[in-house]
């Protein structure tokens, strides 16, 4: 277990939530109870009531309908200011890949822009030297 000092430094955490308790409920209430169960388990583990669930979790639980929910859900929980936001792990990976691609493309564009600007400056210097 992490000490309290280490807990403050952690920004993302991985949880595997088993939804077996939702199968004890009537079939027509399983998905609703599964969402409540996820929120309850996360609030107990994180010791915080401010937990927001990303819409990808809701879509994943309701994917096959209200009666046939998945057995377990793998979540990534990210700390934001004074609350926590839970994402489906596969969705979180997609989001982070998109962000890194954007950053990489921006740096490549910046480098190409910088090289073009340097070429223009060199041309101006050569023109002034010729005169």
Image: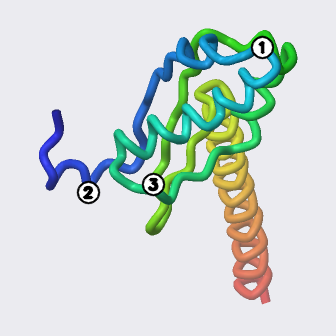
Residue under pointer 3:
79
* C-alpha separation, residue under disc 2 versus residue under disc 1: 40 Å
Say which label, 3 or 1, has the lower sequence index: 1
* Quarter holding residue 79: bottom left
The local secondary structure at tag 3 comes to strand
Residue furthest out toward the front: 26
Residue under pointer 2:
8
Where does the image place residue 80, in percent across and percent down from the top left?
49, 61
Query: Mark 3 near mark 1, Cβ–Cβ under 8 Å?
Result: no
Say which label, 2 or 1, has the lower sequence index: 2
Q: Depth check: 41 or 29 in front?
A: 29
- Establish if 56 lies above or below 4: above
Q: Which numbered marker is on residue 27?
A: 1
Where does the image place residue 128, in percent across and percent down from the top left?
75, 87
Query: Mark 2 near mark 1, Cβ–Cβ under 8 Å?
Result: no
Residue at coordinates 76% horizontally, 25% vertically from top-left? 29
Where does the image place residue 52, in percent across and percent down from the top left?
60, 52
Judged left or right of residue 110, residue 81 is left
């Amino acid at each position: 277990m992490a000490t309290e000092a280490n807990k403050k430094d952690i920004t993302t955490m991985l949880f595997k939530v088993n939804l077996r308790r939702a199968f004890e409920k009537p079939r027509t209430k399983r998905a609703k109870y599964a969402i409540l169960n996820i929120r309850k388990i996360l609030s107990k583990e994180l010791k915080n009531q401010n937990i927001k669930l990303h819409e990808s979790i809701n879509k994943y639980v309701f994917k096959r309908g209200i009666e046939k929910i998945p057995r377990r859900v793998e979540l990534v929980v990210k700390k934001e200011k004074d609350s926590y936001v839970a994402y489906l792990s596969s969705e979180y990976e997609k989001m982070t890949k998109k962000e890194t691609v954007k950053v990489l493309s921006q740096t490549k564009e910046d480098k190409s822009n910088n090289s073009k600007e340097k070429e223009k400056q060199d041309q101006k210097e050569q023109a002034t030297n010729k005169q």
